[in-house]
């Protein structure tokens, strides 16, 4: 099954006409999709030694740390990835998830609002924002 998944990823990247950089990330995708987060992290760190300013590598490393619930390094890597304007909305959404999971609801709501401003058509970003607001709302009436 794992070989089939890897084959499907490689086939997708080849037929999509993606650049060599995306093609070389298939190993990362394979690790990530098979929940081998430590291997994914090591792979991305090696790539970052070769290309330390690549915002996509920082984005994927941030996502790997987030999935592993390593929030401080996830925040650091997401902030380094802000150069890639296409994914800024996603970055704010992931930062919102981190703050929400740490119980920092005002910060999470701020990140979700920013992500929606950048990509208002993304239903996942809308969902996270409203989920966070609902979990935060009892605190508004706590001392009433």
Image (cartoon, rainbow, N blue to C red):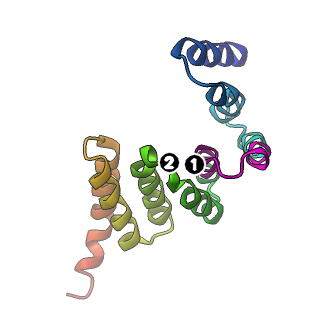
Question: What residue is at 35 percent from the left and 54 percent from the top?
Answer: 115
Left or right of 14, for residue 24: right
SS category of the residue bearing label 2 = loop
Q: Which residue is farthest left?
A: 144
Position of residue 7 measured from the top left corner of the image (x, y, whole percent): 67, 13
Between residue 41 and residue 141, name the one nearer to us.
Answer: 41
Between residue 86 and residue 68, name the one nearer to us.
Answer: 86
Q: Nearer the viewer, mark 1 or mark 2?
A: 2
Left or right of 71, for residue 144: left
Dot label at residue 130: none
Q: Is residue 60 magenta?
A: yes
Residues rendered magenta in the picture: 45-63
Q: Pointer 1: residues within 10 angstroms few (<14), some, or many (20+)? A: many
Instruction: Name the chief secondary structure element in magenta.
Output: helix
Cα distance in 3D space between marks 1 and 2 = 9 Å
Question: What residue is at 56 percent from the left and 22 percent from the top?
Answer: 18
Q: Quadrant of residue 117?
A: bottom left
Q: Earlier in the sequence, mark 1 or mark 2?
A: 1
Q: Which residue matches tag 1? A: 59
SS category of the residue bearing label 1 = helix
Dot label at residue 84: 2
Left or right of 18, for residue 131: left
Marks 1 & 2, CB-CB < 8 Å contact: yes
User: Image height check: is 107 above or below 38?
Assistant: below
The N terminus, quarter of image: top right
Between residue 72 and residue 143, name the one nearer to us.
Answer: 72
The C terminus, quarter of image: bottom left
User: Image height check: is 56 above or below 66?
Assistant: above
Q: Which residue is farthest bottom?
A: 143
Position of residue 78 measured from the top left corner of the image (x, y, whole percent): 55, 56
């Amino acid at each position: 099954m794992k070989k089939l998944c890897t084959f499907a990823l490689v086939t997708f990247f080849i037929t999509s006409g993606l650049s060599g950089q995306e093609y070389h990330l298939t190993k990362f995708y394979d690790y990530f999709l098979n929940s081998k987060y430590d291997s994914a992290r090591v792979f991305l760190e090696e790539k970052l030694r070769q290309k330390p300013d690549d915002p996509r590598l920082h984005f994927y490393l941030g996502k790997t740390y987030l999935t592993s619930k390593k929030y401080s390094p996830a925040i650091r890597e997401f902030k380094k990835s802000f150069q890639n304007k296409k994914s800024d909305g996603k970055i704010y959404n992931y930062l919102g998830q981190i703050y929400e999971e740490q119980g920092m609801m005002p910060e999470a709501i701020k990140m979700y609002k920013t992500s929606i401003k950048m990509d208002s058509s993304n239903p996942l970003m809308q969902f996270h924002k409203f989920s966070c607001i609902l979990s935060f709302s009892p605190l508004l009436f706590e001392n009433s």
